[in-house]
Amino acid sequence: MSDLVWHHLNLCARGDPNETIADAALAVRDGDIAWLGAARDLPREFARWPHEDLGGAWVTPSLVDCHTHLVYGGDRADEFAQRLAGASYEEIARRGGGIVSTVRATREADEDALFASAAARLEPLLSEGVGAIEIKSGYGLEFGSERKMLRVARALGRRYPVSVYTTFLGAHALPPEYAGRADAYIDDVCKRMLPALADEGLVDAVDVFCERIGFTLGQSERVFEAATRLNLPVKMHAEQLSLTGGAALSARYRALSADHLEFLDEAGVQAMKEAGTVAVLLPGAYYFIRETQLPPIDLLRRHGVPIALATDSNPGTSPSTSLLAMLNLGCTLFRLTVPEVLQGVTRHAARALGRGDRHGELAPNRPADFVAWSVGTLSELAYWMGRPLAARVVRAGATVYTAPASRWISGVAADARASNRPKGA
Ligand code: DI6
Ligand code: FE
């Protein structure tokens, strides 16, 4: 790959808008950053390289979506309607709807169908500058279907310009065929599924849904033990609907992250701080299930626990394909600040994946994965609701996406209005 200097840009290299360089330049060699800083300080050796003008755009590291369930069959728009009629998420789950209905649709879909539906959700994320994404299994709940989901996640990473990190979430829900036998299912997860999937190289991390409608603390610990034996990092869906002590357990296993956390208490916060476990907040799920219990943001701040934000993209509680929307929701619903949400989808999200060395920050000798934004200030990234903002997405120094030019064709509007007029009008 040829050497290139990107210039005429404003740089926010660590995702913190309080640390920026105006009129900056970025020199890229073989896909990695060779140098960055104020353009006037550009060392001589780079001055001869070809230059690409970014027109004064703001540049940040590519975004990181560190918690998604992007691969699944079907959708749950019908359940959304039931919820509007008054049923709660937990009620629907207990009636055999919820996660289990997505399990049926996922088991029935073949790899091509799963790939196509997940790709349709991935593309909008990538066009808003996501350069690394975590994708969980957990809608197969039996070996072949969990494997199918993870294979599709890997295939997405090969087909699209994004780093995909896979998480085995076999312990997401109890499959119907194991009704009343949760411990036996956990046996299968720990002794058969996880070791075989890990052996195939399909698993980067292991997750558990520790909850009244998920798995107990004891069962979660067994999954963590199995992961630890295979040298795989763990994470947890913890304290989402009730306080179970899952976050503290996660900390004992040096989890990469504990996620959701609406019901987290101070002891759990402290344990996470000591273990270096990242708090992943999921404002899309909070919003979509109309949760009212706020995660303990002030405690997390006071104890200095890094906060990440993610889409939790899933059919039941966060059917979102926008990480920028999470910035807005994080600010409006959780009262996070703009610096907090921006670092929450860059630096801290990368750390929640265990890949703080690779993603979420621009620095010499790291990959040149960045986004040039069509905004005047970085606050706009959290401000606009639904407006496409990425002008250009660069991966390993190469442009992989540019915002499409406007396609409006003048002169058509009047005709269209005429043909859409209701009969008799
Ligand atoms: N918590 C969630 O928010 C998602 N999974 C989980 O453990 C919801 C999954 C679903 O409803 O399909
Ligand atoms: Fe989730």
Image (spheres, grey):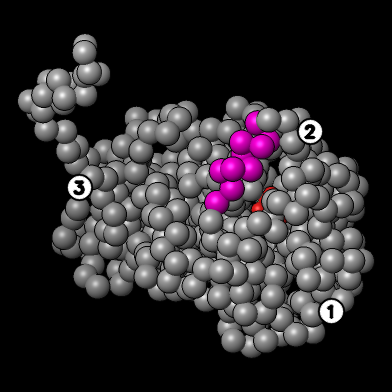
Q: Main secondary structure of the magenta part?
A: helix
Circle number at residue 187: 1
Q: Which residue is mark 2?
A: 293
Q: Which residue is mark 3?
A: 53
- Decide which of tag 2 and tag 3 comes sooner along the chain: 3
Of 283 and 48, nearer the camera is 283
Residue 179 in percent (x, y) is at 84, 66
Of 19 and 68, nearer the camera is 68
- CA separation in Å, label 2 and label 3: 47 Å
Residue 333 visible somewhere in the drawing = yes
Horizontally, residue 64 falls left or right of residue 168, namely left
Mark 2 is surrounded, within 10 Å at the Cα level, by few (under 14), some (14 to 19) or many (20 or more) other residues, namely few
Q: Which residues are magenta?
A: 75-84
Residue located at (89% from left, 66% from top): 180
Up-down: is 340 above or below 247?
above
Type of the residue with mark 2:
Gln
Horizontally, residue 219 falls left or right of residue 257, namely right
Mark 1 is surrounded, within 10 Å at the Cα level, by few (under 14), some (14 to 19) or many (20 or more) other residues, namely some
Residue located at (82% from left, 71% from top): 178
Residue 29 in percent (x, y) is at 30, 69
- Decide which of tag 3 and tag 1 comes sooner along the chain: 3
Residue 145 in percent (x, y) is at 61, 74
Image quadrant in which you'd find residue 162: bottom left
Up-down: is 66 above or below 89?
below
